[in-house]
């Protein structure tokens, strides 16, 4: 079973402040205001990533241009580069909010880098920022598809861009047939799972807690989508290495939370007489699986053998119909 990546637990930590419980709209409004500095930092990071991607494409070093030579002009394909930049910053913010959630979800650490209340606020604001970045990533990708389309009717171009970006199973080119639905699943799960916090007083804290555990699935889908479809990580270069290395602390902290959950009911221990064995077996299997994942990630990060492609010695055909943006 996945750990509860939330700041609340029964008895292991303090209850949340009462002012956050009565009115979900008021709590959301306060968090949106608090997220403004965080969003500003996200915009700055996105701009820096965009500048890096633009410079790499202009110099001919871009892996994107190696995959799709017709996209070698950054001035023409700036919307695609901006979509990639939003995707990278969104993944970074998702990493940060998952790390904060895992840090706050278990037994109270001996030392925290800041006060617990402040870390809880950061967890919520980074979550809101990550959702906004994911939406911007998808919208800019759709805008590039609309610009790229050569159909004469603008309504047809709008529909094609919308359907390829937001309708599961519609995009039918190359690795996008798998990667695009993974990204859509991450987006469509992230928004409701993130916003359920603000209506937990209506649906019940236990229901919200069980659902919120699956935010880790959103993160896994996002990383998988990036590995499959992020052209800047297709080859065994430093962006792919950095992406893999960032997963090690997430996997290790997830394993710690599985081995030492905050709630007594979720602690493994030897099965007691009369206890529900299926539930114990599921929790035990989850811990074994998490340990195997951590070991596999460590091997992949050290060896560099992760299934990435080799950069082609000769560029593929330059026809714009040979590849779709991805």
Image: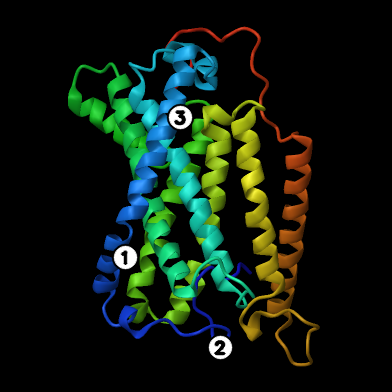
Identify the residue at image location x=47%, y=39%.
88
Q: Quick one: 280 or 83, which is closer to the camera?
A: 83
Q: Is residue 315 above or below residue 79?
A: above
Q: Position of residue 274 (x, y in %)?
A: 75, 92
Q: Is residue 98 left or right of residue 308?
A: left
Identify the residue at image location x=77%, y=56%.
292
Q: CA distance from mark 3 to mark 1?
A: 39 Å
Residue 321 showing in the rendered view: no
Q: Quadrant of residue 33?
A: bottom left
Q: CA distance from mark 2 to mark 3?
A: 50 Å
Q: Is residue 259 above or below residue 137?
A: below
Q: CA distance from mark 2 to mark 1?
A: 25 Å
Which residue is identified by label 3? 172
Residue furthest out toward the bottom: 274
Q: Quick one: 105 or 121, which is closer to the camera?
A: 121
Q: Quadrant of residue 140?
A: top left
Secondary element at image label 1:
helix
Q: Quadrant of the N terminus?
A: bottom right
Q: N-terminal of the two: label 3 or label 1?
A: 1
Q: Is residue 42 above or below residue 154?
A: below
Which residue is identified by label 2? 11
**Cβ–Cβ under 8 Å for marks 2 and 1:** no
Crowdedness near tag 2: few (<14), some (14–19) or many (≥20) residues, C-alpha within 10 Å = few
Crowdedness near tag 3: few (<14), some (14–19) or many (≥20) residues, C-alpha within 10 Å = few
Q: Position of residue 318 (x, y in %)?
A: 48, 7
Identify the residue at image location x=41%, y=30%.
50
Residue 201 showing in the rendered view: yes
Crowdedness near tag 1: few (<14), some (14–19) or many (≥20) residues, C-alpha within 10 Å = some
Secondary element at image label 3:
loop
Which residue is identified by label 1? 31
Which is in the foreground here, disc 2 or disc 3?
A: 2
Q: Position of residue 202 (x, y in %)?
A: 32, 80
């Amino acid at each position: 079973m996945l750990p509860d990546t939330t700041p609340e637990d029964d008895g292991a930590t303090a209850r949340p402040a009462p002012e956050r419980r009565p009115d979900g709209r008021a709590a959301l409004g306060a968090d949106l205001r608090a997220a403004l500095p965080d969003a500003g930092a996200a915009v700055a990071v996105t701009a820096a990533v965009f500048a890096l991607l633009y410079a790499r494409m202009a110099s001919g070093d871009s892996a994107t241009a190696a995959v799709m030579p017709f996209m070698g002009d950054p001035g023409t394909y700036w919307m695609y580069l901006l979509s990639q930049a939003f995707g990278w910053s969104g993944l970074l913010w998702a990493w940060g909010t998952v790390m904060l959630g895992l840090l706050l979800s278990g037994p109270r650490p001996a030392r925290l880098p800041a006060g617990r209340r402040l870390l809880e606020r950061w967890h919520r604001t980074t979550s809101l920022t990550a959702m906004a970045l994911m939406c911007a990533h998808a919208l800019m990708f759709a805008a590039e598809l609309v610009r790229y389309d050569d159909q004469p009717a603008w309504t047809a171009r709008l529909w094609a861009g919308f359907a390829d970006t937001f309708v599961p199973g519609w995009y039918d080119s190359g690795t996008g047939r798998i990667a695009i639905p993974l990204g859509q699943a991450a987006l469509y799960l992230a928004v409701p799972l993130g916003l359920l916090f603000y209506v937990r007083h209506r649906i019940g804290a236990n229901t919200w807690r069980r659902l919120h555990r699956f935010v880790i699935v959103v993160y896994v889908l996002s990383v998988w989508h990036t590995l499959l479809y992020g052209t800047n990580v297709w080859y065994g270069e430093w962006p792919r290495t950095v992406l893999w290395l960032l997963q090690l602390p997430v996997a290790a902290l997830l394993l710690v939370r599985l081995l030492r959950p905050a709630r007594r009911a979720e602690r493994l221990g030897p099965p007691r007489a009369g206890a529900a064995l299926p539930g114990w077996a599921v929790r035990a299997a989850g811990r074994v699986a998490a340990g195997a994942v951590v070991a596999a990630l460590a091997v992949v990060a050290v060896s560099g053998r992760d299934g990435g492609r080799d950069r082609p010695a000769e560029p593929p055909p330059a026809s714009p119909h040979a590849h779709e943006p991805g």
